[in-house]
Amino acid sequence: MAKGERVLLVEDEPAFVATLRFQLQREGYEVRVAPDGPSALAAFARVRPDLVLLDLILPGMGGMEVCRQIRQQSSVPIIMLTARTAVGDKVAGLEVGADDYITKPIQLPELLARIKAALRRAHLATDPTSTVLSVGNLRIDLGRHAVLVGDREVQLRAKEFSLLTFLARNAGQVVTREQIMRRVWGSEDVEDSRTVDVHIRWLREKIEEEPSKPRLLQTVRNVGYRLAG
Ligand code: CA
């Protein structure tokens, strides 16, 4: 359940607005509506929303222009809503700074998932207390002890988190089991190094699409491991 995060819905079709507003409010969002481009910009300045849902086809000023103008002043997540499926529109939308696109007719579960993902990314990017390590599609938030694989948050045990962080700080380089034992477990005892292999296996089960064919967390035979850079 969202905790009063403010969504600015920029959309000119009353029936669609009514439905979407009801559904978003039921999910816990605070919803403000603007029916055209100029009022969207005014509402944006007034409300300072946490996220903008922006229709592409609007009276007065198109969604692309609204997006461009918001982007000049803010990094707020913007999800464009459009009836069009043309690739050119998507590319243009992303070029003017939209974070994501969703095509009408909108499936509510999909829209809610995209909204949550966009808000999570925004929180990770803007929280001044967090230090985020990014490797490929992995984001490790050191402040919150949170790990995202793409848009999916994974739960790691403390040692798994330390291990992943150590590998991420050395992304692209091979680290030996001995280095891992020393740095993550504080141990020189190399006989313990099977502990490392076990934790690597657990990590792969959480961060790899196919844990048996790891692409991120690679084994370097007879040496150790490497997190792909
Ligand atoms: Ca429209």
Image: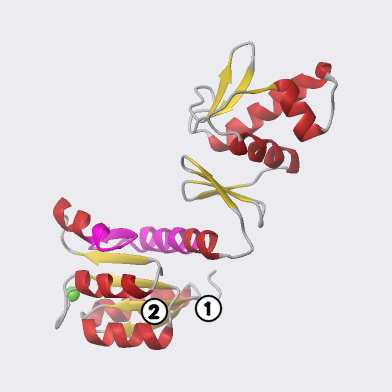
Question: Is-magenta flag for residue 107?
Answer: yes
Q: Is residue 110 above or below residue 136?
A: below
Residue 86 in view? no
Residue in the image at 55% along x and 37% along y? 207
Question: How many dots with numbers?
Answer: 2
Dot 1: element: loop
Task: Inspect the magenta stretch and tell me whether residue 117 lies in it.
Answer: yes
Ligand 1 - quadrant of the structure image:
bottom left
Can residue 62 be seen at all in this image of the molecule? yes
Q: In the picture provided, is 155 more to the left or to the right than 86? A: right
Residue 22: which disc? Answer: 2
Q: Are marks 1 and 2 in contact (CB under 8 Å)?
A: no
On the picture, is 174 further left or further right than 216? Answer: right
Q: Residues within 10 Å of mark 2 (few under 14, many from 20)?
A: few
Instruction: Judge from the rendering whether residue 131 lies leftward or rightward of residue 120; answer left or right.
Output: right
Specify the segment rendered in magenta. Answer: 93-120
Q: Residue furthest top?
A: 222
Q: Residues within 10 Å of mark 1 (few under 14, many from 20)?
A: few
Residue drawn at (21%, 54%) of the image? 91
Badge number at residue 4: 1
Could you say whether the residue bearing mark 2 is in a helix, strand or loop? helix
